[in-house]
Image: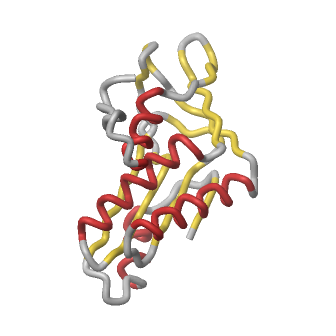
Amino acid sequence: MISVQEEDFDHCNEYKFLKDNADSDGAIVTFTGLVRDFNVDGSVSSVFIEHYPGMTEKSLMDICSKAKKRWTLGQIRIIHRVGLIEASEQIVFVGVTSKHRNNAFEATQFIMDYLKSDAPLWKQEGTSNGMKWVEAKKSDEKAKARWSGDNSATWASPNKD
């Protein structure tokens, strides 16, 4: 299930949904991303996320389809918030169920790596100098490339661009 929404979400409710619908799956992995209060250029007070309705949801569904082709998965739940989101607030939720933990862990990382690179979402950061558009990071592309089997691409450290 995919949701692109302005409203915040309740992590506990999302986990409960996954657990209640996991059938015989033995693993649930969730990731919740928060708006960081910093970036390379300094402090960040908020972000403003824009999206293209319909296209964003389709892109997220395509990412889920790719994950289901790679791993045996049960439920997938993605929530991405749009609009104005303050620092330290929740921005994204990914939850995956599977019969085995490794599939659930890897699929969750895969979904996030593809979401960061492929989903049509555009971000501005609120800084002391006003709103500033955020460009794609090379580290996000490297993280995504590790799933392609290209051994020349290494997984990006979260502390590097």
Question: Which x, y percent locates residue 110?
Answer: 41, 53
Location of residue 143 with respect to 125 vertically, above or below: below
Give the position of the N terminus as an image quadrant: bottom right
Q: Which residue is farthest bottom?
A: 24
Question: Which x, y percent locates residue 20?
Answer: 39, 84
Identify the residue at image location x=45%, y=37%: 35
- Position of 139 compared to 116: left or right? left
Give 135 or 36, whichever is nearer the viewer: 135
Give 24 or 139, whichever is nearer the viewer: 139
Location of residue 73 with respect to 154 vertically, above or below: below
Location of residue 72 with respect to 86 vertically, above or below: below
Identify the residue at image location x=60%, y=61%: 62
Give the position of the C terminus as an image quadrant: top left
Give 34 or 111, whichever is nearer the viewer: 111
- Position of 38 compared to 65: left or right? left
Location of residue 19 with respect to 3 vertically, above or below: below
Give 33 or 145, whichever is nearer the viewer: 145
Count of numbered tags = 0
Question: Which x, y percent locates residue 17?
Answer: 43, 77
Question: Which x, y percent locates residue 48?
Answer: 62, 34
Identify the residue at image location x=36%, y=52%: 109
